Image (cartoon, helix red, strand yellow):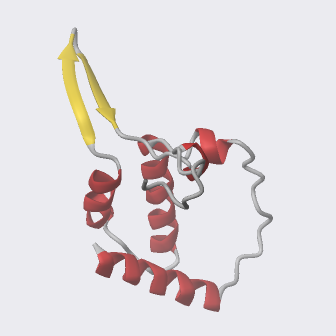
Amino acid sequence: MSLVQQLLLRALIARFWETPFTAPLVPWGHALRDRFMLPYYVEQDLRDLLADMARAGYPFDPAWFAPHLAFRFPTYGTVHHGGVDIEVRHALEPWHVSGGGSGSGRHGAFR
């Protein structure tokens, strides 16, 4: 998993070295917290990035990142009922809501 992450990072650096990013940044606002913590949107964003990298001459197979998605968003359960498949997966959680604050004078989330 680490090798494919390093390869992607090196490819991004090489790509932006050759053609710097000049488009205006997208003002995502709360969508970063509301959408991009969910596995579906993270996977779609990753697929968009990999397709863009392939167009720039840096092809990556999306299957290389399947272990990353499975690790970060484990499946809790699936059910098939009436022709509908439902899958429940873990989503990301921002640190500021994870109960990591210290109330007893000690630092960190581990007490």
Measured along the vertical axis of the image, is residue 58 above or below residue 64?
Answer: below
Residue at x 52%, y 59% (from the top left corner): 108
Q: Quadrant of residue 26?
A: bottom right
From the viewer's perspective, tell me whether residue 100 is left or right of residue 78.
Answer: right
Point out residue 103 in the picture as x, y percentages from the top left corner. Answer: 60, 47
From the viewer's perspective, tell me whether residue 75 is left or right of residue 105.
Answer: left
Point out residue 25 in the picture as x, y percentages from the top left corner. Answer: 77, 62
Residue at x 46%, y 64% (from the top left corner): 51
Q: Quadrant of residue 5?
A: bottom left
From the viewer's perspective, tell me whether residue 63 is left or right of residue 98.
Answer: left
Point out residue 61 in the picture as x, y percentages from the top left corner. Answer: 31, 67
- Total residue callouts: 0
| On-image quarter of the N terminus | bottom left
Q: Nearer the viewer, residue 66 or 17?
A: 66
Which residue occupies the extreme top position in the image?
Answer: 82
Measured along the vertical axis of the image, is residue 8 above or below residue 28?
Answer: below
Q: Nearer the viewer, residue 37 or 10?
A: 37
Point out residue 52 in the picture as x, y percentages from the top left corner. Answer: 52, 67
Measured along the vertical axis of the image, is residue 3 above or below residue 27?
Answer: below
